[in-house]
Image (tube, grey):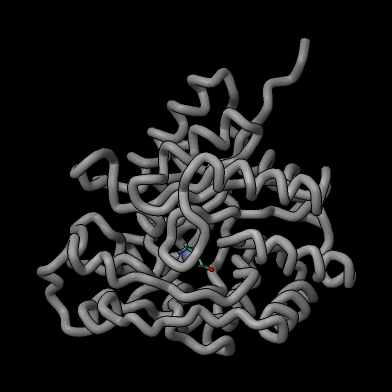
Amino acid sequence: MAKTRKVIITCAVTGAIHTPSMSEYLPVTASEIAEAAIGAAEAGAAVVHLHARNPEDGRPDQTPEAFSPFLGVIKQASDVVVNITTGGAPTMTIEERIRPAQTHRPEIASLNMGSMNFGLFPMLQRFPNLAHQWERDYVGNKDIIFNNSFGQIEHIVTTLGALGTRFEFECYDTAHLYNLKYFLDQGLVKGPLFIQTVFGLMGGIGAHPDDVMHMKRTADRLFGDQYRWSVLGAGKNQLPIAAMAAAMGGHVRVGLEDSLWAGPGQLARSNAEQVTKARQIIEGLGLELASPDEAREILDTKG
Ligand code: KMH
Ligand code: ZN
């Protein structure tokens, strides 16, 4: 009998883009982040992508110490694959961004494959009543450039690669796939590459089905069978993009980092709620969820 294809759900539980006033369900404290990650794993996520926040006001916090309390709790409770951000927040320096992964040596770290404008400001129209001034300054900033130069990318792959960390290569446009191809050709990264194609963020590629097809075709042409394809749709695009990719052989990422929503005008009450919705789509297509150990095998995290 043919084996059923296994689909990896990654859950990005809090991120650095959404702010606490946008949703009371956004995890902020270490215990909220731990609870959200464990809940997502119990609902079917094989990988959790993690950022930390200052518990006082919810600001992104990229100190290694901010990650320690929830990493310990998650490890105790679950065998979920841990993925630590090196993106941090687009306002942080590369040295700040790399430190949590350098310190905690996760199985996976995110790696953003190119610089781009980061247009958070349209969100201000949807959330005019942000409680903190820092939130208004951050979201309202029209000059955010997400800096990921070739030198910075090389610094991350060599520093973290030497520690045995594998990468979630975040590609927000086709140029980022070509950048990744350069690093592959130079022998600085090795397959299977876990490529997270990102759709619908202002500054990156759109979220039209043609955009998804174009990214996939380009990745197929550049990487053949040397990559594992996953998708992330921002905001309302989250589940439609997940459904498309799951049907086309991809893996999916959900979580409150990428979308606060469970449906039109309906805030997701937890990360687990979004994982459950993705799971229903995947299982409805006759596919199976990958367990954490199956994800390790698919992504070759053990090298
Ligand atoms: N917020 C996502 C669109 C990172 O943490 O390295 C991208 C992200 C970046 O997850
Ligand atoms: Zn992230």
Q: Quadrant of the C terminus?
A: bottom right
Q: Residue furthest front?
A: 210
Q: Is residue 234 left or right of residue 224?
A: left
Q: Residue 147's x, y, as percent?
A: 55, 82
Q: Residue 302's x, y, as percent?
A: 78, 55
Q: Residue 210's x, y, as percent?
A: 55, 42
Task: Please tell me whether residue 116 is drawn above or below residue 235 in the rendered image.
Answer: below
Q: Is residue 84 left or right of residue 132?
A: right
Task: Please tell me whether residue 76 is drawn above or below residue 272 in the rendered image.
Answer: below
Kindly identify the residue that appears in the image at 39 percent across and 80 percent down.
61
One can see residue 292 in this view: yes
Task: Please tell me whether residue 278 is drawn above or below residue 70 in the rendered image.
Answer: above
One can see residue 46 in this view: no
Viewer-nearest residue: 174 or 2: 174
Viewer-nearest residue: 33 or 299: 299
Kindly identify the residue that appears in the image at 44 percent across and 77 percent down.
89
Q: Is residue 157 left or right of residue 130?
A: right
Kindly identify the residue that appears in the image at 43 percent across and 84 percent down.
91
Q: Which quadrant of the figure has residue 295?
A: top right
Task: Please tell me whether residue 251 is drawn above or below residue 64 in the rendered image.
Answer: above
Kindly identify the residue that appears in the image at 49 percent across and 33 percent down.
243
- How many marks overall? 0
Q: Residue 259's x, y, as percent?
A: 35, 52
Q: Quadrant of the N terminus?
A: top right
